[in-house]
Amino acid sequence: MISRQDMGSWLDGAPQGSQPYPGRRLGRPAEGPGSIARFPARLVALVVDWVLAVVLAGLFLAQWNGSGLMNLAVFFVISVLMVGFFGRTPGHWIMGLQVQTMKGRPAGFGRAALRTLLLCLVIPALIADEDQRGLHDRAVDTVLVRVR
């Protein structure tokens, strides 16, 4: 007879990877500046950026009644400009995060545009590897890290 231990359980959670913390195989520290940004900080930053985009779309693009597509367009523009210029969006700034290349430099405009386009498609951002890099980051060879 097959027992529960033989089959495993959803109560055990997802299988744990071979590395003790996200980013180890990328040469990133476990904690502090340069370490991989964790999910709660990413989520808060995304919510801050989305709320800012909705507010700006509502204020300046009122003739379009703040449609979802306009909100997404404003989110795209804010993200590309801010990540292109500073390596971070307003939400990233608040949470102490930065989008960097794998070599530790700010992403730049080309990477920011493609990364944000993929982020707006949602699905690439939801599929992540064991280093917590979504497909949108892997596609442009970037990583979201803590800077403080």
Image (spheres, rainbow, N blue to C red):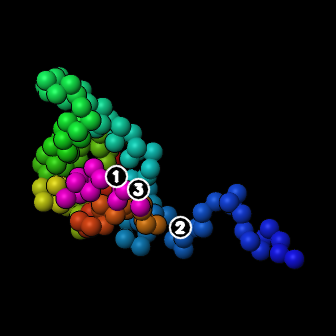
Compared across the picture, whether 95 is left or right of 30 comes to left
Q: Which residue is mark 2?
A: 20
Q: CA distance from mark 1 to mark 2?
A: 28 Å
Q: Which residue is mark 1?
A: 122
Per the image, label 1 sits on a secondary structure element best described as loop
* Residue 122 horizontal/vertical position (percent): 34, 52
Q: Which mark is residue 36?
A: none
| Residue 9 in view in this figure | yes
Q: Which residues are magenta?
A: 114-127
Q: CA distance from mark 1 to mark 3?
A: 7 Å
Tell me the quadrant of the picture where the N terminus can be found. bottom right
Q: Tell me: residue 48, above or below residue 11.
A: above
Q: Work out whether mark 1 precedes mark 2 in sequence or the reverse, and give the earlier one.
A: 2
Of 24 and 148, the residue lying toward us? 24
- State yes or no: residue 135 in magenta: no
Tag 1 and tag 2, C-beta contact below 8 Å: no
Name the residue at 30% across, 62% down. Answer: 137
For image coordinates 15% across by 43% down, the residue present is 77
Q: Which residue is mark 3?
A: 126
Percent from the top left, x then y, of residue 15? 60, 67
Q: Amino acid at mark 1?
A: Val
Q: CA distance from mark 2 to mark 3?
A: 22 Å
Nearer mark to the viewer, of 1 and 2: 1
Amino acid at dot 2: Pro
- The reply, left or right, for residue 25 in relation to residue 102 is right
The image quarter containing residue 96 is top left
Q: Position of residue 64 (x, y in %)?
A: 16, 27
Compare residues 65 and 142 and report the one nearer the observer: 65
SS for dot 3: helix
- Amino acid of disc 3: Leu
Query: What secondary structure is the magenta-colored segment mainly?
Result: helix
CB-based contact (under 8 Å), mark 1 and mark 3? yes
